[in-house]
Image: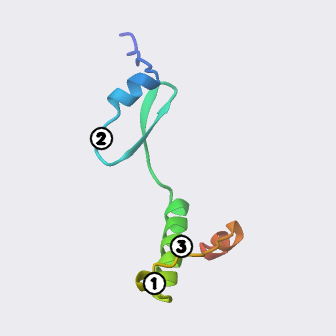
Amino acid sequence: MAPATVKSIGFSAFIEACPDDGKRYELVDGQIVEITATRAHDDVADFIYDAFRDEVRGSDLIRSRTFLDLQLSAQSIFDAVGG
C-alpha cells in the first residue's frame, strides 16, 4: 500500500480553513498546526500578569484613570521565572 500524501495549503487556504475554536494555529510547511504554550511561556505570562495586577492594586489607577508606567526588563522576567 502506498503511503498517504498530505496536501499542502497556502496562506489563503489557511485563512479559510483555520478553525475558529479559540485555540491558536499557524501554517507550517503547508499544514495547519495548533500552537501550544510551553511551561516557560506560561511562567512568563503569569509573571507579567502578576506584575500588572500588583501595580494596579498598589495605586489609584482605577479611580484616577492614570496610565500604567510599569517597566519590565528581559532580565527581570528571566530572574522572576527562575531562568
Disc 2 residue crowd, few under 14, some 14–19, many 20+, Cα 10 Å: few
Q: Earlier in the sequence, mark 1 or mark 3?
A: 3
Kind of residue at badge 2: Asp
Q: Quadrant of the N terminus?
A: top left
Name the residue: 44% across, 50% down. 36
Judged left or right of residue 32, residue 66 is right
The secondary structure type at the circle numbered 2 is loop
Residue toward you, 33 or 10:
10
Q: Position of residue 66 (x, y in %)?
A: 51, 79
Name the residue: 41% across, 15% down. 5
Q: Which of the two marks, 1 or 3, is nearer to us in this view?
A: 1
Residue toward you, 4 or 40:
40
The label number, if any, that marks residue 20 in the structure image:
2
Residue placed farthest to the front in the image? 64
Q: Position of residue 82 (x, y in %)?
A: 63, 73
The secondary structure type at the circle numbered 1 is helix
Residue corresponding to mark 3: 47
How far apart in space, not on screen, are marks 1 and 3 (Cα)?
Answer: 25 Å
Q: Earlier in the sequence, mark 1 or mark 2?
A: 2
Residue toward you, 55 or 23:
55
Name the residue: 55% across, 66% down. 44
